[in-house]
Image (spheres, helix red, strand yellow):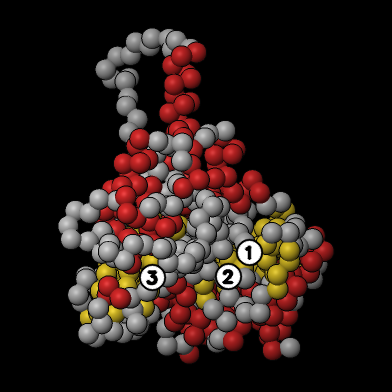
Amino acid sequence: MAVEVIMPALGMVQDMGVVISWLKSEGDKVEQGEPLMEVETDKATVEIEAPATGTVAKILAKEDEAVPVGHVVALIAEPGEDIVDAPIAPDVSDESGLTEGSEPSVQEALNVSPVAKRLAEKHGIDISKIPAHGNRITKEDVTLFIESQQKENRTVSKRIPVSPKARRLMKELGISIEEIQGTGVNGAVLAADVLAVAEREKTAQVGEGRVEPEITETPEAASVARELPMSTIWQVMAEHTAKSWTSIPHFYLMRELDVSRFVEWRDSVLDRAKVKVTFSDLLVKVVALALRRLPRVNVVWENGRLLQNDEVNVGLAVTTEEGLVVPVVRNADQMSVGQIAAVRLELVERARKRRLRPEDIGNGSLTISNLGMYGIDSFSALINAPEPAILAVGKIKDSVVAVNGEVAIRPIMTVTLSCDHRVIDGVLGALFLKIIAEMIEDPLSILD
């Protein structure tokens, strides 16, 4: 029996994935666990592995095509298996009103592919009314029929798939589905489609309601704004941070720490480690242990509920050419500093080469954003939802401080904890930051 390859959900707020490239073609043999395709999500570009060993019998999603989470994108058949007889998994329902169903009743005389049957049933189409462009009705025939119907009558809104994000935008902006031409799979309406309509309407309103004054400029003063190319990762990052800032009640706790012993700890580890250990690696260890000691912080807010995480997974903000991504060091509380450094090196390398795997992202407990290496003294970071907090780390600098009533020069580092007030109140956040501060200022306390 053929195995369905499903568009995975790699983030709690993800509703679509974009097929960037297929690493195998139809007819190619593939081993279970072998990279099959590259998918761009709201987190990063990741390689999706084959769920079974066999032959790539059918690819159902084109490159650069946005596919709803849960939809079948390919079929892997066993050796000698006829893909015509392979069952097709039902698509996952969403707010568009599409629901799961059984195989439609089709006249026995019709030669119809299983994919075509499923697609016709999903759109409520009588398969007998679809003209075939060969000796059988295929998915392409159904798709062409659907497109022709949509062009003739755009009022059949309940049959047009709409992503949850697009539906929310339509409600907020007061845009009806009849105004939108979906660009997703099977005409699905995406968030970008809604925003495009909103921008066109805004431009039209400006043109109708106001005459712009004519501005005369010399050739030297004239300038033309040009649109910069923007990756999906950057676009989603922009949407994600905007949503974080507008929907999460942030508050901030800041501490200046004497990192004399922290620096000594790093120097000591460097002498023994097989890989280069950075201050970020030590911070991952410290934050992981703090989360283990105070598990009440290792909680996420989801639909009005507080959900406890069982794992301690610490994210590290990494900048790439495509935008900011947050790979996760999983079970960091159970690792040595050397192991954390090795994992961090591998994650950063994969992130910058756009080779992150599904297990490398998501389900983070808390993120660390370290800009100290860029000379930043201190800053406040936006929470990486749905995590409850993020730790922003500034540079280490020599400062004049009072030590036992005397003036001294000590290496000082400023850390700022951004907290989601729905999950963490002021006292809990202060207690958590106190635990972090104690371990940084006195690393031997980690052994307590």
Q: Could you say whether the residue bearing mark 3 is in a helix, strand or loop?
A: loop
Residue position marked by numbered label 2 in the rendering: 364
Q: Are marks 1 and 2 in contact (CB under 8 Å)?
A: yes
Question: Quarter-wise, where is residue 388 in the image?
Answer: bottom right
Which residue is nearer to you in this view: 370 or 88? 88
In percent of width and height, residue 264 lies at: 58, 80
Q: Is residue 376 left or right of residue 4?
A: right
Specify the quadrant that holds the N terminus.
bottom left
Residue 88 bears which disc, if any?
Answer: 3
| Within-10-Å neighbours for mark 2: few <14, some 14–19, many 20+ | many
In percent of width and height, residue 271 lies at: 47, 87
Residue position marked by numbered label 1 in the rendering: 387
Specify the quadrant that holds the C terminus.
bottom right
Q: Could you say whether the residue bearing mark 2 is in a helix, strand or loop?
A: loop
Please state which of the two labelled residues, at mark 1 or mark 3, is closer to the viewer. Answer: 3
Structural distance between the alpha carbons of marks 1 and 3: 36 Å
Question: Quarter-wise, where is residue 32 in the image?
Answer: bottom left
Amino acid at dot 2: Gly
